[in-house]
Image (cartoon, grey):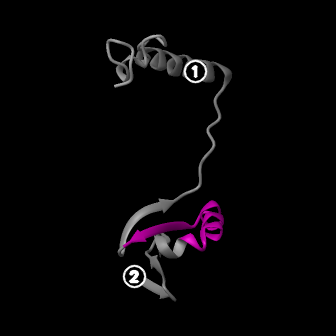
Amino acid sequence: MVHMLGRVALSTGSEWCAMRISVTEAKSQLTELVRRAEAGDEIILTRHGQAAVRLVPVTKVRLDANARKKLLESVRAAGAAKASAGPGAGKSQDFLYDENGLPR
C-alpha cells in the first residue's frame, strides 16, 4: 500500500516501511534523508516515478590484524598485476613532433 504525504510516498507492508521521494525533491532535503537512513529508515529515491537508488547506512567492518594484512597483500598484488611500465618520459611526447623535431 502506498500513502502520500504531500509529494512524498510511504510504501507500507507487513514487514517494512520505505519513504519514496524524487531525486529532484531529495536535493533540498539530503541532510534530513541521510539522518533518517542512518536511523534505519529505508529511503528510496525515484526518477520519473521509478525507483532509482536506495539510501542505506554504511556498516563498519572490523578486521583483525591477520585479515587486514591478507587483504592489503591481495590488493597490492592485484595492483601490481595491472600496472604496466608504459613509455619512458623521454619518449612520451614524441607523437607531438615530426621526424625533424618540429611541432605537428
Q: Quadrant for the N terminus, please.
A: bottom left
Q: Secondary structure at mark 2?
A: loop
Residue 32 shows up from this direction: yes
Instruction: Determine if the magenta segment contains residue 101.
Output: no
Q: Give me the disc on residue 19.
A: none
Residue under the point 48% across and 73% down: 24
60 to the left or right of 102: right
Count of numbered marks: 2
Q: What residue did someone put label 1 on? A: 72
Viewer-nearest of labels 1 and 2?
Answer: 1
Is 45 situated above or below 93? below
Which residue shows up at 65% across the image and 70% down it?
A: 32
**Can residue 22 be seen from the camera position used here?**
no
- Could you say whether the residue bearing mark 1 is in a helix, strand or loop? helix
Density class for disc 2 (Cα within 10 Å; few <14, some 14-19, many ≥20) is few
Q: Crowding at label 1, few (<14), some or many (≥20) Cα neighbours within 10 Å? A: few
Range drawn in magenta: 27-47
Q: Which residue is mark 2?
A: 1
Amino acid type for the residue under numbered disc 2: Met
Q: Position of residue 62 (x, y in %)?
A: 65, 35
Q: Is residue 33 magenta?
A: yes
- Residue type, label 1: Leu
The span from disc 1 to disc 2 (Cα, nearest Å) is 47 Å
The image shows residue 103 at horizontal and vertical percentages of: 38, 23
Q: Is residue 14 above or below residue 78?
A: below
Question: Which residue is depicted at the point 59% across and 50% down?
Answer: 58
Is the residue under label 2 in contact with that under label 1 (CB below 8 Å)? Answer: no
Residue 10 in the image: state x and y as whole percent.
Answer: 48, 79
